[in-house]
Image: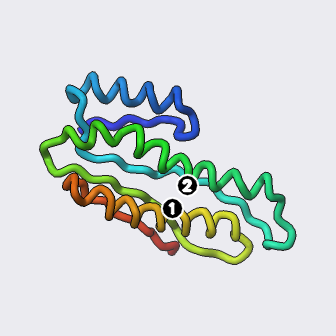
Amino acid sequence: VSGLSSWTTSDESIASSISQNSDLTDGSLDALLNNAGAGYSMPLMDLDIAEARKPFDLNVFSLIRVTHAFFPLLVKSTLGEMVVNNTACSSAAFCRGSNASKAAAASITEVLRLEFGPFCIEVINLMMGSV
């Protein structure tokens, strides 16, 4: 088992990961784990919109960006490929930006599950709780 990581908001880093993966696997990918995340803690009436957008870029749009980039490799796998999106640890007060972005990521994961079904790609929404 080999693992690669990339900075998910960087198209160059993602392209580098795809190239490295292709070298290791002849251009296929059996599993993609999206596990990036960031938060922003602030009551809704006090939050800064520019700061609140940052978790959405990392928690939502990078999930789409990475999955889109690796989709052709997932389709080429013959071993029962899967996508696992770690969309939440927990919801907490004053983390409205984080909570909203993780809820959006969970909804996108459900859409991916439906869209990837015909390609026999399993999509899992991993929602860990806090202890």
Question: What's the residue at 22%, 52% (across, down)?
Answer: 119
Q: Quadrant of residue 29?
A: top left
- Residue 26 position, x and y percent, is 20, 26
Instruction: Say few, some or many: other residues with alpha carbon within 10 Å of mark 2 (under 14 / 14 to 19 / 20 or more).
Output: many
For this rendering, which residue is in front, 16 or 64? 64
Question: What's the residue at 39%, 65% (across, down)?
Answer: 125
In the image, residue 121 sits, relative to residue 66, either above or below, namely below
Q: Are marks 2 and 1 in contact (CB under 8 Å)?
A: yes
In this picture, residue 99 sits left or right of residue 131: right
Question: What's the residue at 41%, 30% (across, down)?
Answer: 17
The residue beneath circle 1 is 105
Could you say whether the residue bearing mark 2 is in a helix, strand or loop? helix
Cα separation, mark 2 vs mark 1, equals 5 Å
Q: Which mark is residue 60?
A: 2
What amino acid does circle 1 point to? Ala
Instruction: Say few, some or many: other residues with alpha carbon within 10 Å of mark 1 (under 14 / 14 to 19 / 20 or more).
Output: many
- Residue 124 position, x and y percent, is 33, 63
In the image, residue 37 sits, relative to residue 106, either above or below, namely above
- Residue 45 position, x and y percent, is 85, 73
In this picture, residue 81 sits left or right of residue 35: left
Could you say whether the residue bearing mark 1 is in a helix, strand or loop? helix
